[in-house]
Image (spheres, rainbow, N blue to C red):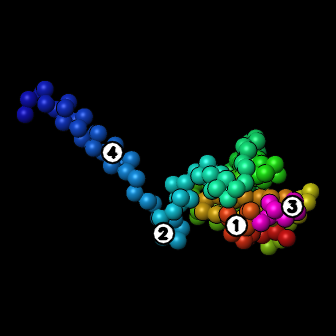
Amino acid sequence: MTLRKKPQIFIAVAFAILAASCSSASTPDQNGSGGKNGPGADVYDLFAEIESSGATVENAEALSQPFLSVEGQIVKINGVEIQVFEFTDAVAALAESEMFSSDGSSTSTTMITWIDVPHLYLKERFMVIYVGSDSATIETLNEILGPQFAGR
């Protein structure tokens, strides 16, 4: 093989690897089935799912909570603020969710004083916290995220 052919082969192999890594095959989610909010999903996929339910979503600002290991963001759903925290994977999100008491008033290391009723949800690698009592917001969150794992 001549030296002139090697760069062409290298480029062809690199292109093939890139094309394979960009394939549109579905990635299994926690339950083993392909899904939009599977392990490769990001927070914008979650926002799109919320919007598909008919709600409006506005990204507001960054947020941190002293009892969580990741930064989050305040998001408005139909004008109501919720907190969204994105973990590296579903295992990390589940591990942090297990630190909360069932009523959401504390973690294994922190007592929490909420300004209203807390509702904590977990979906794949996302933890969503809504502090309030707006029934439409709670209904939307229950529909998209499933039942809360902690709160009242």
- Type of residue at label 1? Glu
Q: Amino acid at mark 2?
A: Ser
Label 3 near label 1: C-beta < 8 Å?
no
Crowd rating for badge 4 (residues with CA inside 10 Å; few <14, some 14–19, many 20+): few
Mark toward the start of the polypeptide (4 vs 3): 4
Categorize mark 1 by other alpha carbons within 10 Å: few (<14), some (14-19), many (20+).
few
Check disc 3: other Cα within 10 Å, few if <14, some if 14-19, many if 20+. Answer: few
State the separation of the CA atoms marked 4 and 2. Answer: 23 Å
Residues in magenta, as a range: 132-139
Q: Marks 2 and 1, Cα distance to the nearest angstrom?
A: 19 Å
Q: Earlier in the sequence, mark 2 or mark 3?
A: 2
From the image, tell me which residue sits under label 1.
143
Query: Residue at the spot x=16%, y=32% of the render?
Result: 6
Judged by depth in the image, the label closer to the viewer, 2 or 1, is 1
Distance from Cα at disc 1 to Cα at disc 3? 14 Å
Picture coordinates of residue 67 (x, y %)?
Answer: 77, 56
In this image, 145 relative to 109: left or right? left
Q: Quadrant of the N terminus?
A: top left
In the rendered image, the quadrant that contains the C terminus is: bottom right
- Determine which residue is flagged by label 4: 19
Q: CA distance from mark 1 to mark 4?
A: 36 Å
Residues at badges 4 and 3 in contact (C-beta under 8 Å)? Answer: no
Against 63, is 109 above or below?
below
Labelled disc at residue 134: 3
- In the rendered image, which residue does mark 2 sit on? 33
Q: Which label lies toward us, 4 or 3?
A: 3
Q: Residue 101: x, y in percent?
A: 80, 71
What is the x, y in percent for residue 46? Answer: 63, 54
Mark 2 or 3: in front is 3
Q: Amino acid at mark 4?
A: Ala
